[in-house]
């Protein structure tokens, strides 16, 4: 019997050039949506102070559902990467198609929950009636982008998992350009379009996600990727792969959901400190999103490369890989933190706020920039655990860290009502809490023979 042909394009090495080759397109694909968030907030900051403040609460709420999709994709990415490392391309399309079913069901649940729960939850925390009404009505519109977002996100699992991250770029650029243009047209009512104000940002984001979805799947079709992995060719129910995806992804879905829920809790507590504190915190979310995009790309690279190496039976090379990824990720984060601390006014000035806003935000940006350095290696280690296949461990790590995080923010922001820069120190607690057990688990032996 002849040996199976090895498709080397699906298998990775531990070289720095391979790491960068995978990570750069991912960072670009992560960066552009973060630029969309910043663009929304810049336009809204120039539209009104109140809109910029409300965007913090609504943006983080939508991120809860985006994070659920991200959790599903992380699990699928680890599975697809493992099949790529095992040289089993015929299984990749089967996993992808079943993931589409799951993502659409989750999207429907998200829409229903938004319409039924949001008014009651927000009423408990948002005291200002104007901010409350703006937030609720914005989300009633924005949440309809969820099905498009989820299917659009799934290109990450497919392209990163099969070592083809360079094709992420086209859809990302299309989404970004359309979002900027539609923000300008719909928020301010330019060139005959209706002036929708705050809600214009919601419509712009939905249409941008639709455009990005169309473009990236056109690229997947044009490059023959769909045909190679038999995407969308078999829509029959596949209980074995469905169970495998849910077993792998369910802990990650809960992990990412509770992580962003805790951040929403943080923002709702910030609301009690006033509109300026909420607006400042919204800009800090942009700092994490924009400057952290490369770190998250290295984290996604850690996930897919660790899983791929294990699929090749090269477990002994995993720590060599992790050391190299951490060096690159942390080095970049240190550079960004230095730039942020040298020129904080330059970054903050783009939001069109007054001098008092900038002055109050600078201490917070000092705290956030240092937290980014902690994040740069902690999230790489956490994603290595995911790539190893034991997603229950990542959920346990996340759960205990969230308890520490929420206890801290409640005491600081609500019980003692301390300044928001003290509240933002919760990020130090969070990333240290993630780092230590992730490192401890990966230093052990249990992950080395985990099958998924």
Image (cartoon, helix red, strand yellow):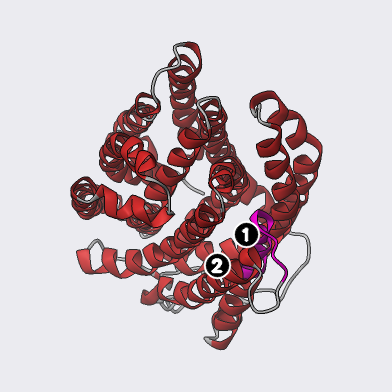
| Mark 2 neighbour class, 10 Å CA radius: few under 14, some 14 to 19, many 20 or more | many
| Mark 1 neighbour class, 10 Å CA radius: few under 14, some 14 to 19, many 20 or more | many
Q: Is residue 386 left or right of residue 20?
A: right
Reading the chain from its start, which is encountered first: label 2 or label 1? 2
Quadrant in which residue 386 is drawn: top left
What secondary structure do most residues of the magenta stretch adopt? helix
Label 2 or label 1, whichever lies nearer to me, is 1
Q: What x and y, as percent, mark residue 452? A: 51, 49
Across the whole image, how many numbered discs are drawn on residues? Answer: 2
Q: Can residue 165 be seen in this view?
A: yes
* Part of the protein shown in magenta: 194-209
Image: 364 above or below 237: above
Q: Is residue 404 left or right of residue 274?
A: left
Image: 326 above or below 154: above
Q: Nearer the viewer, residue 445 or 211?
A: 211
Q: Nearer the viewer, residue 252 or 409?
A: 409
Q: What x and y, as percent, mark residue 236? A: 78, 65
At mark 2, the secondary structure is: helix
Residue at 51% over, 63% down:
156
Residue at 38% over, 30% down:
424
Q: Which mark is residue 155?
A: 2
Residue at 45% over, 16% down:
417
Q: Can residue 302 be seen in this view?
A: no
- Mark 2 near mark 1, Cβ–Cβ under 8 Å? no
Q: What x and y, as percent, mark residue 244? A: 62, 49
Please tell me whether residue 222 belongs to the stretch shown in magenta.
no
Q: Name the outermost residue toward the top.
A: 415
- Residue picked out by circle 1: 201
Q: Distance between the residues labelled 2 and 1?
A: 24 Å
Q: Which of 136 and 315 is in front in this view?
A: 136
Q: Is residue 8 left or right of residue 249?
A: left
Residue at 59% over, 50% down:
66
């Amino acid at each position: 019997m002849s040996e199976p042909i090895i498709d080397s394009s699906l298998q990775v090495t531990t070289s720095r050039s391979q790491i960068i080759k995978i990570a750069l397109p991912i960072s670009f694909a992560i960066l552009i949506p973060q630029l969309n968030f910043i663009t929304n907030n810049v336009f809204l900051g120039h539209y009104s102070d109140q809109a910029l403040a409300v965007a913090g609460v609504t943006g983080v709420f939508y991120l809860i559902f985006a994070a659920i999709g991200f959790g599903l994709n992380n699990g699928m990415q680890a599975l697809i990467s493992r099949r790529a490392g095992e040289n089993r391309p015929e299984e990749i399309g089967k996993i992808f198609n079943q993931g589409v079913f799951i993502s659409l069901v989750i999207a429907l649940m998200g829409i229903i929950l938004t319409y039924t729960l949001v008014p009651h939850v927000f009423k408990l925390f948002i005291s200002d009636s104007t901010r409350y009404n703006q937030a609720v009505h914005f989300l009633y519109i924005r949440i309809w982008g969820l099905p498009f977002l989820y299917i659009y996100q799934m290109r990450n699992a497919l392209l990163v998992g099969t070592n083809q991250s360079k094709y992420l770029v086209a859809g990302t650029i299309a989404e970004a350009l359309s979002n900027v243009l539609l923000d300008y047209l719909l928020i301010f009512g330019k060139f005959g379009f209706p002036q929708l104000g705050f809600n214009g940002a919601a419509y712009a984001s939905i249409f941008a996600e639709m455009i990005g979805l169309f473009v990236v799947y056109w690229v997947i079709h044009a490059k023959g990727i769909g045909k190679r992995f038999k995407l969308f060719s078999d829509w029959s129910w596949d209980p074995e792969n469905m169970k495998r995806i849910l077993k792998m992804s369910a802990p990650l879905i809960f992990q990412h959901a509770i992580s962003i829920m805790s951040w929403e809790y943080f923002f709702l507590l910030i609301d009690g400190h006033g509109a300026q504190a909420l607006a400042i915190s919204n800009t800090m979310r942009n700092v994490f999103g924009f400057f952290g995009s490369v770190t998250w790309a290295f984290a996604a690279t850690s996930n897919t490369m660790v899983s791929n190496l294990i699929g090749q039976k090269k477990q002994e090379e995993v720590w060599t890989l992790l050391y190299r990824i951490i060096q690159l990720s942390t080095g970049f984060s240190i550079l960004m933190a230095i730039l942020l601390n040298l020129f904080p006014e330059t970054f903050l000035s783009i939001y069109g706020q007054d001098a008092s806003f900038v002055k109050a935000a600078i201490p917070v940006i000092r705290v956030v920039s240092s937290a980014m350095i902690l994040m740069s290696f902690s999230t790489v280690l956490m994603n290595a655990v995911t790539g190893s296949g034991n997603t229950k461990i990542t959920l346990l790590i996340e759960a205990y860290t969230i308890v520490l995080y929420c206890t801290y923010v409640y005491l600081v922001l609500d019980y003692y009502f301390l300044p928001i820069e003290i509240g933002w120190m919760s990020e130090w607690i969070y990333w240290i809490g993630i780092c230590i057990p992730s490192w401890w688990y990966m230093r052990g032996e249990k992950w080395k023979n985990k099958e998924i």
